[in-house]
Amino acid sequence: MRRYGPAFWAQLSFTLLVCALLVVPVVLSMAAGLTVNYFVGIRSGLTLRWVAEVWALYADTIRLSLGIAVACLACTLVLGVPAAYVLARAKGPVARAIEELLVMPVAVPGLATALALIVTYGGAGDFRRSWLFILVGHVLFTLPFMVRAVLAVMTSIDLKTLEEGAASLGASFVQRFFQVVVPNCASGILAGSLMVFTLSVGEFNLTWLLHTPLTKTLPVGLADSYASMRIEIGSAYTLVFFLMIIPSLILLQLLGRRGRR
Amino acid sequence: MSGSFHLDGVPIRLEGCARTYDGGVRALEPLDLSIAGGETVVFLGPSGCGKTTTLRLIAGLESPDPGGRVWFGDDDVTRLPIERRNVGMVFQSYALFPNMSVADNVAYGLRVRGVATAERRRRAGEMLELMRIGDLAGRRIDQLSGGQRQRVALARALVVRPRVLLLDEPLTALDAKLRDSLRLEIDRLLRTLGVTAVYVTHDQAEAMALGDRIVVMARGRVAQVGTPREIYYRPADAFVAEFVGTMNRLHGQAADGMLALGGAALPWAGPAGPAEVLVRPEDVALADADAHLRGSVAAAVFLGDRTRVVVETACGHTLTVDAAGRAAVARGDTVGLRLDPARFLSL
């Protein structure tokens, strides 16, 4: 049996401390959502009443959030993968400059992007009132994450030679793209998809400004419930959020793993 | 290798094919070349000489400057992209698809041609057997050695029955021993298949071993086209002489049918005046009594089958000489050299 020195225990304690710092508030919040009365504490007993109430009040925000996340993922796949491909194949300073500019939507505050969208499209009534308005904001915000994740993989493999190999065997551009380029970038596409999906589900800054009373997403509803309901309801909402996002992430992972085989 | 698999090689003709890159860099000066059906032509030259550009023009991966034409038999393929030229290509980096098994890689060309699954599995299997890697069919590409990858790449290029087989430095990434054995195998394959093959390399031994003809290139131009023997024994210019094999250059003075070289006089058929003669290392012999030149050994490298000796002569020449492997020479020894005027080469 190996003996561990003091340095090991010090590092282990530090790691556990950091983990606790991250995990404890989440666990406490979820526990609060299951307690009968938060101010009395766990002694007051456990209940699913708050969860049921959240479902009754906010089920449509959950549906909308998932719907927007799936639509956003679809848009970023359709736009982002070809964009990454073009950037990976293009030489020259313009392509490199665009690559650098891809961090912009991350660096610019979501509020600023949202304001710009409202200033531009605020007058388009139906569009402004529909969930598509929020979708546009989410795609704008998440697209760079997809492009960068896919681009990173594309630049790490010899894409040009792989494609030339496929072309020499008679493959047309479409065949090359879907049978050689996309499968060999699957890991980047998966990483980008996970990122886009979670960012979209959890996005608050942009959505706060873009939503209308009829197009509330989950995080907006969460803020709403914390602001205007009992703390137990907000906490139960957080619990629902986790129950929803974790299975979807696992599902995406499994899909990606199967695609790679 | 199997004799049942045979391809009908088409002749290739390049007419005035030049290639200028953006920014005006001329990679290839206008080139005219005919390659016979079933012939193996090796493009040989240092990096940047235009050999790979020429291959890519034939492949259809690049287009010649306006005016240039590429013919496969009677078909003008100048405007056809590579995917419509029906060529087989083997890349230096293999370009195998990591997302597919060995069998799927080999079958890919059949898949894009719409061949039914069972049929393409059968033909891919046959091709793997031909390359003697039938047992690797189910492997992933990252589970293969370099030599195995190259066999898969060859099988994949040949399974579609290409009109032309193009090989871009296919052995460069392999170690020396493997390179020699695969070179022999490729040679046998090209002979039996009867395919028109264009092979690019910077390795003159590879070029000599594989080429029916060799095209030596330098700075975007063809320096010489000829059989390996012609290139070796009748180099067109100093560049070819130096690039292919090792060449000694000796300077002497010719007069009255004799050439004065150091202290020796040799029969000479050329014009009088200063003369330069070229002689290969294997055509100079170590000698004692009847030596023409004397000098001291600057280096002696034992290579097994021969000993390569560098001799600095009293008359100021440095000669590389191939002596027998068992010849006992060491650095600092004084040796005599015998020349044979019949073996002199001239440009």
Image: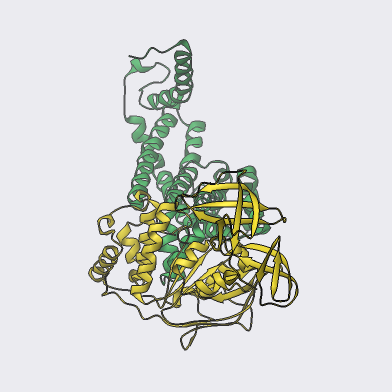
Chain colours: A green, B yellow
Residue B113 visible in image: no
Q: How many marks?
A: 0
| Vertical order, B217 against A185 (above or below) | below
Task: Compare residues B188 and B200 and report the one nearer the observer.
Answer: B188
Q: Residue at x 57, y 45 (%)?
A: A206
Task: Compare residues A42 and B5 and report the one nearer the observer.
Answer: B5
In the drawing, does residue B122 fall left or right of residue B102? left
Q: Residue at x 70, y 70 (%)?
A: B259
**In the image, residue B123 lies at what x, y percent?**
27, 69
| Vertical order, B142 against A44 (above or below) | below
Task: Compare residues B94 and A237 and report the one nearer the observer.
Answer: B94
Res B106 quadrant in image: bottom left
Residue B84 visible in image: yes
**In the image, residue B120 lies at what x, y percent?**
27, 69
Residue found at the very far front of the displayed protein: B289
**In the image, residue B291 lies at what x, y percent?**
61, 58
**In the image, residue B312 lies at what x, y percent?**
66, 52
Q: Residue at x 35, y 51 (%)?
A: B144
Task: Compare residues A82 and B133 and report the one nearer the observer.
Answer: B133
| Vertical order, A80 against B123 (above or below) | above
